[in-house]
Amino acid sequence: MYSNPSNEEIEKILKEAKTIAVVGLSDKSDRTSYQVSKVMQDAGYKIIPINPTVDKVLGEKAYPSLLDIEDDIKIDIIDVFRRSELLPEVAKEAVQTNAGVFWAQQGLYNEEAYDILKKENKTVIMDLCIKVAHSVLVKK
């Protein structure tokens, strides 16, 4: 049965993380994925856009998929802006990366994706906005 880590664990993840790969990051400034990623970038995180239809977002090189990111790039968090039914597909890619945390944005949840990730000892956070969690849990 799925449950998010404690607020203390989420705070620790956010404080230790440096790089966030954002699956489904749009280059359109009116989209939630763009707005959330911009706030996280402004907070000091390196953003890696994952979107096969764009070349750059927020000044960063975009990759078609998680598996296209060079192996020497350390990913701390994979933040996902894709529909819930697509999460298992993203989870299968995520377990092939060096990322320790899989984060599905607010409104997104999938038990199958959770099972795939937990089998590989990944930390899973679902149905929670990373920007909101950061603003509440990470005190400047």
Image (cartoon, rainbow, N blue to C red):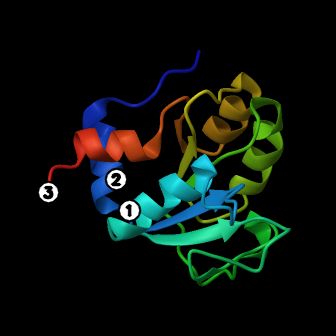
Residue 77 can be seen, yes or no: no
Q: Of the numbered discs in the image, which one, if any, rests on residue 140?
A: 3
Task: Specify the amino acid type for callout 1.
Answer: Ala
Q: Earlier in the sequence, mark 3 or mark 2?
A: 2
Please tell me whether mark 3 or mark 2 is closer to you in this view: 3
* Disc sitting over residue 25 in the figure: none
Disc 1: which residue: 17
Q: Amino acid at mark 3?
A: Lys
8 in relation to 54, above or below: above
The percent position of residue 3, horizontal first and vertical second, equals: 49, 21
Tag 1's secondary structure?
loop
Q: Residue at x 33, y 29 (%)?
A: 6
Position of residue 26 measured from the top left corner of the image (x, y, whole percent): 70, 60
Q: What residue sits 72% from the left and 34% below the top?
A: 113
The mark found on residue 14 in the picture is 2
Q: Are marks 2 and 1 in contact (CB under 8 Å)?
A: yes
Q: Is residue 26 above or below residue 70?
A: above
Residue at 14 percent across and 57 percent down: it is: 140
Most foreground residue, 77 or 136: 136
Density class for disc 2 (Cα within 10 Å; few <14, some 14-19, many ≥20) is some
